[in-house]
Each structure stands twice: as C-alpha cells, then as structure tokens.
Amino acid sequence: MERPYVMAQNGNVENGSAAQTHTQSQRYLSTRGEDYGLSFEEVVLKGLATDGGLYIPEAIPDASSSWRSWKDLSYPELALEILSLYISPSEIPRADLKDVVDRSYSTFRTKDVTPLVHLQDRQYLLELFHGPTFAFKDVALQFLGNLFEYFLVRKNKGKTGKDRHHLTVVGATSGDTGSAAIYGLRGKKDVSVFIMFPKGRVSPIQELQMTTVPDKNVHNLSIAGTFDDCQDILKSILADGDANKSLNLGAVNSINWARILAQIVYYFHSYFSLVKSKSDFELGDRVRFVVPSGNFGDILAGYFAMRMGLPVDKLVIATNENDILDRFWKSGKYEKKKAQGADAAGGLVVDGVLAHEDGVKETLSPAMDILVSSNFERLLWFLAYEFAASAGMDDLWNKKQAGQEVSKWLKELKTTGSFGPVYQDVLKYAKRDFESERVDDTETIETIQDLYRKVGYVLDPHTAVGVTATLRSVSRAGPGVHHISLSTAHPAKFSGAVDMALREEEAFDFEKQVLPTEFIGLDKKEKRVSDVENDWQKVRDLVKAQVEQELSEA
Ligand SMILES: *Cc1c(COP(=O)(O)O)cnc(C)c1O
C-alpha cells in the first residue's frame, strides 16, 4: 500500500550536482493540532506542546533511496546521517551536529555503541545498555544533554551574570530515567538538574547511581511518597506559571522529541549489523523487532525507522502485566485500568494481586509499569492521519482532521478513563505495522532461566519480557524470519529478579558473571540527596533555593 505523509528529502537536484541539493527545512507540529510550524530547538526546549499535545515532524523523511548506502557507517556517522534529516542545517550546522553526536556516543563502553549479539537460531539481541548508566535510556539522554548544552552555549554567547539563560530540568523517576538524565546533564554549564524519586522505592543500585554523582548542578530529591506522587509534583510545578518563568523549566521525560529521534538510529544500525553477521540475512530482507514497552518511546522510534524505509516486517510490542497497549491491539479500545474487582479494604485488585490505587501493578520489570503510554499519542496521530488521507482530501485537511481526532480521543481518556473502540480502519493500520504480546512475571522468570540454561546468557527482566514475546512471534511468523529483541537494561541493574530466577543454578555466580566493576564500591562514595515532604510547593521552593545557591557559587 502506498503511504501518504512521506516527503522527498532531496527536492530537485538541479544540474545533477549534489552541492545544489536542496533540503526542505524540517518543522514540527503538535499531535493536537493547535501548535505548528515550530523549529527543532523550540520543540526540544519546550518538551510538551502548548495545547497539551506532543511534537512530531511535519513530514517523515523518505530515506528509501538512500538508506542502503549507510550500511558501513560507524554508529556516530550513521547517527549524523539520520539526525540531519530531522534537523535543518540552518538550525544546527552539520559540523556542529557532528560534534554533538560524536561527544554523545564517546561515553559508551563499546565502539559499536549498540552491539548486536546472537541469541539462538535466527534470534538476536540488540544490547542497548553500554552507556554510563547501563540502560537504553542513555542512548537518548546522552544526546539530549549535549543538545541542551549546545543551545545554551549559543544563547549565552557574550553574556555574563544574570543575563545568561539558565535551564532548570526537573524530572520524576522510578529508577532508570533519573540516572540517565543525571549522567546526560552532569557538569553542563547553565543547566541544573533535579530528579525526584520515591524514597525507599527505587532499587539500591539505581539510588546509588543517582546520589553518588559529585557535580554541583545535580540535585537529588528523595520524596516521602510514591512514584505517582513524584509525577504529580512534577506536573504541578510545570503547571505553575510563576515557577516556570523564574526557573525556565525543561523536560527530559520520554515525551521529548529528541529522545525518540536519537533512538531511530539503532534500528538501522542493528539491521546493518545483522546483514554483516554471518547469517543468511541480506540487505533488503525484512526483520522483526521486538521491544519491551512501557511509555512507547522506544518502539515508536522503530516505527519512524520503518516509515523512513527500513525493511521491517513487524514491530512487536512486549508489555508486562500493565498491558494497556496489548489490550488496544486486541480490542481497539484504549482503557486506563482493567480492575477485576475491589478487595474488602477498597484497594484495587488486578489479576488477583493488590495493585496501587490507580491500577498500576508492580512487576519484575518496573520500568514498564505504567498506566498509560504517553508516546502512544504520537502513533495515534499517524493512524488518524492515514485514516483521514484515505478520504482523499488535501494534506492540510488531513493534518487538521488528525489533530482533531487525537484531541477528541485524549479528552475522552482524561474524562472517562478510556476511548474507543477506534474505527476498524485505524486498528487495521495499527495491526499492519505492529503485533503485541503480554508477558507475566512467571513467564519472565522462566525465560531468564531457560536462556541461561540453553545459551548461558543472563537476561534482565525487561529484556526477558521481550524475548518471551520473540519466542511467540517466531511460532507465528515461522523459523525463517529473523528477530531482533531489544535488550533494554544490564541484568545487574535488576539483580532482584535475576537472583530470583537463577539462584538455584549450581554454577551461577552473580558477582563473577553479572556484576560490572563500575557498580563495585558505589556504596562507599559520598551521597548527595535532600529529603523532601510529599508537597509540591515545598519541592518548588527547595528547587528555587538550590538553584539560587548553585548560581551564587558558580
Ligand atoms: C524505560 C524502559 C523501558 C520502556 O521503554 P519505553 O520507551 O517507555 O517503552 C523498558 N526497559 C527498560 C529497562 C527501561 O528503562
């Protein structure tokens, strides 16, 4: 099927000279239609659109005639090619972008940045955890940190003292995002970073990763509450006009477009790695990607890669028991919670297990414990656009329709807790590109055990959710289809689940086989963290005070 909404990247090549190639400048619009025509810099610094939507490019660049030529590029070279299709050179000159990209990936422990390893049969693992904090979020947050720095250096050229533009990044984390954001922003000039985490509810290693960073611009806030409390505090602070103005707030959570953008690169990179491996896979063959998903940011990058022209057979969503995405693909209905009954005390019971009041279930793959997937809104826009385009009107009308449809769905979700079922055709488009699987904790543990016994590889629980989904996908697609499972975290970050799965194995030794040297001795380092009450105004005031103090010491 011919797909709309892909623009030719190279325009007219006059006189056959590459130097004359004209690249249309890339602009961004909001999924809710009220905010459009923005530059890349604006969308990166703003994070969320003014109409409450998320930013997407006005056109997905068509790389179908150029992607094959990228096969032998190094990771940073490939990143430069892909990113420059989304960032106009008039905004960031190519040499500057190259410098930002090179610095972002020089902090990874492997030259390949995201190596592809063979698991078994035609199944591969894409290891995304070789960055500073041992989880896939580093791939995007190393880049985002350097981007913030680049924009600030540019804004502050020749300025001193109070005239300098200062950015305060505030984030809430249940573990992985916080440390990755801190490592992306530590030591950067004119940026302060504040990370809130629920006191006593992140894993010891995650907490140490955050609190042992010595840089003065890093501030950890241990909140007496849950992760949801931290998110509520964040929302209140972001919505506080006064704080927003005086602090100039920036966002690093996965709604930031730059994070999705950076993640597109490893889909192409791993595809080329597969071509270059000794397998029977050739340039042009189709592959399946399987992605352990929570907020839908990682897999959405795969969707962009596919739309740019990468031969993807299917993108397979793997969820844990927090399965709102899986239920959407099965029913066309997007529904906040699936309460199966309330217990006597009034708490919510999901699948027989007492859940948080809001319906999130705690699982062994906590980075995927979500109620709604924020980036799903971006896919919804493209589905709605395609639906509108099938009526054959002009592009402007289609975009307007898509924005209106998405606004309607999201409003319904907010007021009633669900929307849908969506039109049959919308679901049909979703199913053409994606499949989905839901994996419970028992299966997760079994997969960690099975793979360890079979091939000696230790999976982290998130990756194990993905590998379980891969096995099911193989049984549907057949053994001839190549699968790449995204490995989103190093197993040492989630030692509890790994220990639960493997402690009975005779020869297994966590410290020898799993624990990276970087984690040893972290607990001996000095810790920097402030305890704060679960009260957004107290948090806001503390943030203000710490920023002032930091600036006065600078
Ligand atoms: C964040 C995270 C995920 C989920 O990624 P999304 O982009 O939110 O779908 C999966 N695994 C790990 C280890 C993570 O940190």
Image (cartoon, rainbow, N blue to C red):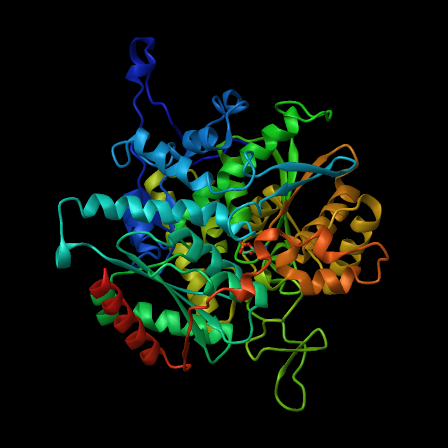
| Image position of 443 (left or right of 60) | right
Displayed quadrant of residue 404? bottom left
For the residue pair 307 and 238, the one nearer the viewer reads as: 238
Picture residue at 46% right of the left edge, 76% below the top: 229
User: From this viewpoint, which residue is outermost toward the top?
Assistant: 15
For the residue pair 109 and 540, the one nearer the viewer reads as: 109
Q: Is residue 141 above or below residue 314?
A: below
The x, y position of residue 26, in whole percent, is: 32, 36
Picture residue at 56% right of the left edge, 38% below the top: 110
Ligand 1 image-quadrant field: bottom right
For the residue pair 97 and 260, the one nearer the viewer reads as: 97
Picture residue at 35% right of the left edge, 55% below the top: 47
The N terminus is located in which quarter? top right
The x, y position of residue 530, in whole percent, is: 40, 75
Q: Is residue 473 above or below residue 369?
A: above
| Image position of 231 (left or right of 359) | left
Q: Is residue 63 above or below residue 296?
A: above
User: Residue 551, can we see it?
Assistant: yes
Picture residue at 58% right of the left edge, 74% below the top: 359
